[in-house]
Image: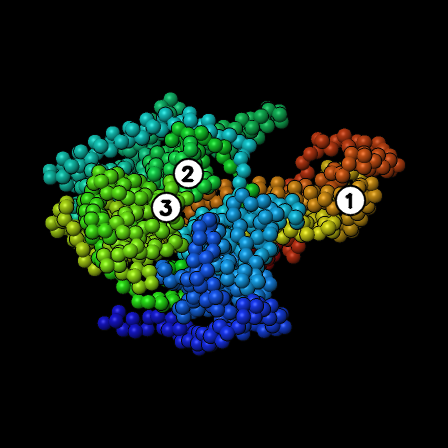
Amino acid sequence: MISAFLKLFSGRHYRQFYKRCQPIIRKINRLEEEYQALSDEAIQAKTAEFMKRHADGETLDDLMPEAFAVVKNTARRLCGKDFEVCGQIQRWDMVHYDVQLMGGVALHSGKIAEMATGEGKTLVSTLPLYLNALTGRNCQLVTVNEYLAQRDSEWMGQIFRFLGLTVGCISHGQNPEQKRAMYGCNITYGTASEFGFDYLRDNGMSSSRSEQVQKEHFYVIVDEVDSILVDEARTPLIISGPSQDDNSGPYLKLKPDIERLVRKQKQMSDQLANDAERLMEENTDEAIRLLLQLKIATPKHEKLLSLIENGSIRRMLEKYETEMQGDFRREEYYRMKEELYFTIDEKNQQADLTEKGRVFLTPDDPDAFMLPDLASAFVEIEKDFESSLEEKQQKKLNIENEFIEKSQYIHCISQLLRAYTLYQLDDEYVVQDGKVMIVDDNTGRIMPGRRWSEGLHQAIEAKESVQIEKETKTYATITIQNYFRLYEKLAGMTGTAETEATEFNDIYKLGVMVIPTNKPCIRIDQDDVIYKTKRDKFKAVITEIDGAHRRGQPVLVGTVSVESSEQLSRMLKQQNIPHTVLNAKLHQQEAEVIARAGQRGAVTIATNMAGRGTDIKLGEGVRELGGLLVLGTERHESRRIDRQLRGRCSRQGDPGSSKFYVSLEDDLMRLFASNGPIAKILEKTFQEGEELAHPLLNRSIESAQKKVEQYNFSIRKRLLQYDDVLNKQREVVYGIRNDALLQERPKDLIFELIEEEIVDQVDSTLESGGRNQEENNIQTLIKWLILHFPYPFKPEDFEGKSSDQVVSFLMEKTKEVYSMKEGLENPDYLGHLERFIIIRAIDQNWQNHLTEMEDLRRSVNLRGYGQKDPLNEYKNEAYKFFEQMVGEMRRMIFSSLFRASTNAESYQELLRRLNSVARESRPEESAAASSSSQAQASAQPRRPVVRELPKIGRNELVTIRRNGETQTVKFKKAEAMIRTQGWEFISKD
């Protein structure tokens, strides 16, 4: 009753939106009827008229009914005409329905329009794109692959070109001039990754304004928005290049040992399975203990999966596992795991060696997996008063090398173990042309150019005996979420978004609007059919396909992996059933294969969402046979993707039906649906070959899917929280970089950065140690200046001056010497030189910083074991790293300013003049200072300046306060806490 009562209010906001749209739609249709009497030239003149009215102050909302009417009228004028689209002749037969006008209103309003497959989302997008392009700014449409981008730009571009707008399409491989022309159009089509990579290249890679291609981020519509903003959001966009280090050697060297280890555990697992099966009747408790051990060792062992199909055995195993993980039996649980060679955690994708496994790998070296404690070792070395300074440094270097070598050894073993136990060929990846290619687990498509990080990709390459490529170094990176949050207006369209409405609202501030279908959907969605084993499930699928094929009904079969699609293909070949396979290995043929899937007698096997964006039109006589039959061979982790598969049939009122086949051996059922009604059913006599079908089972499966969706959402949200930290830093760095590119002479920017560095150095040297150390502090400052600035400073230049006066004096000398340099350089190239100095310093330090941040991101989770929030720890450390990176960047600019030159002659002349100044001042001391500069290559450690705080030593204790809580910490830690966490300085202790 409660459920029925709540349903009365569900969809209320949709109905309110529909009500608001009705008068707008009526006005659009009335205007469009009037426009039918106009000539082509009169309709085309409307674009210039609308642009002028907008420039004179009319809003886009004011213009919307007229603009939409013009677009609809243009579509009507194009009817019956033939156009070449992607090399094929297509006849235009589309005019906007009322529901498509409603979808256009939703997209213009910055919402996600959920429209069923076949409702014409591609045509809907022409309405808001035309309207927003009237501003004269670049509008964009994002698709899931380059074929669709090219097709839509040519097909829908007919409307825009007729109305006087320009249309472009970006694709991989275009040169900067071509891309700049595409972005210069009123409307630009492309893929999410290409838009994102262009942004990274513009802001993180280009060395001049002429190399940048994007104009702005104004209005974008994301087609298949759930696929791009949700499914692809866990994988950041990364531009990388080969690292200097080649770590392929350890993987090849360790591969035989890991293979022996995996074989050893397999033998042990087989023995555990046999013993558990034998003891099941005699000693159930011991049998369950062995099964738990088997589950930890090999979660997908065939005999384990077979035994836990028995509901009572599975329930006993789950109860026993829960008890063992509790506080009272945790030590016993630990001892059980230590009897194995390694343990596997499927949900977290981890494989960990036990002590037994470590001994197996290194029987002659018990300390092979023990990392040296660097801090303690360094303290002991310093206590050795008999060793010289050089000997101590050598000992420290040896300890560090040992630490690095062991760390690399342990890391390589860990990644190889994951590669052999958790990543399977034709499931998570495929091998093509001697390369390991990642398969997207949501779309089933290959992701060319993508590599797993942390050496995992190299480990899998070693496993598959293909060429091990060098580890890459990140040059620029951004997440999908943060890229699309750059836009002023963001909208999206898809057939399935409602289940992810919360995520769209939380991450992107996007509302979801469900648009009704033009014709009622008459698809028949049958209950899921559940089998005990995969073998029974596939037999039933083959029988269903055979029956449909014999009567001529087309069948589209959805699988979740390449492996499943190929297994099903082999079974169909044995039955002599002709069919077509579309998986990650054949993704180039997606649109062509999917378009033929509705022909009489066609059997098409496709992984997940392959072919999204392509209509399946029914062949002759297929409607009478019941339309397209869609069969799912497994429930996906996401309900959206199952809905996408169902939605491939019954477009525009066509008949069709869908049915999912599920087995208890499927990963979703095994990992997430082991409780609830299904668990009770398993206790009954559910034998092999039998099938179960009931609406209650559908709800149980959906409940399991919701659990996975919530888990994946939490991962994406956490990823975004971490990237938000880096995103703020990225905005600062890219801002400085673009300032340098946009200015003809970025001299003022250079002096601004140099002044910040001088302030930092003056504060950290002249203020340390008190007045008694003033002379030493001045000498330290002079030595630092000698390293970076070719001017003969003397101690008396600084004596008796405050910090501010010293800064002013140094800036005056910097500008004086640079003015001398300007007079010697080639004026035509001086701006290029200044940009080069800034860009090189930014890129080199930013790329190193990204590597450090990746390492930090991987390691910071360990702090959770110390009851610390990893995210807060990441924020604190990231701030410190960023301060250090900016300092290194400024120092590099300061140092390079007087070392770089447009030509060798001007550089030599500058040195000659400065040497003359040095001889006139104090030649003997200048020479001494120059000779000692190399020995003083490292000045005192720099530290970030917190200008609003008093000048306090870095290690002195201070008291800070936040929300009534006070802490006493070292000043260097207080600085970061005040900057990033909202703490307030109280006093120095």
Q: Amino acid at mark 3?
A: Gly
Q: Are the residues tagged 2 and 3 within 8 Å (C-beta)?
A: no
Give coordinates of residue 559: x percent, y percent: 30, 47
- The residue at which mark 2 appears reads as 437
Mark 1–mark 3 Cα distance, whole angstroms, equals 54 Å
Q: Quadrant of the N terminus?
A: bottom left
Q: Residues within 10 Å of mark 2 (few under 14, many from 20)?
A: many
- At 39% from the left edge and 24% from the top edge, which residue is drawn? 365
- At 43% from the left edge and 43% from the top edge, which residue is drawn? 447
Q: Are the residues tagged 2 and 1 within 8 Å (C-beta)?
A: no
Give coordinates of residue 436: x percent, y percent: 41, 35
Q: Amino acid at mark 1?
A: Asp
Residue at the far top in the pictured view: 364
- The residue at which mark 3 appears reads as 444
Total labels drawn:
3
Looking at the image, tell me whether mark 2 or mark 1 is earlier in sequence order.
Answer: 2
Mark 2–mark 1 Cα distance, whole angstroms, equals 48 Å
Viewer-proximal residue, 548 or 234?
548
- The residue at which mark 1 appears reads as 828
203 sits to left or right of 810: left
Give coordinates of residue 567: x percent, y percent: 27, 40
Mark 2–mark 3 Cα distance, whole angstroms, equals 12 Å
Q: Is residue 652 above or below residue 762?
A: below
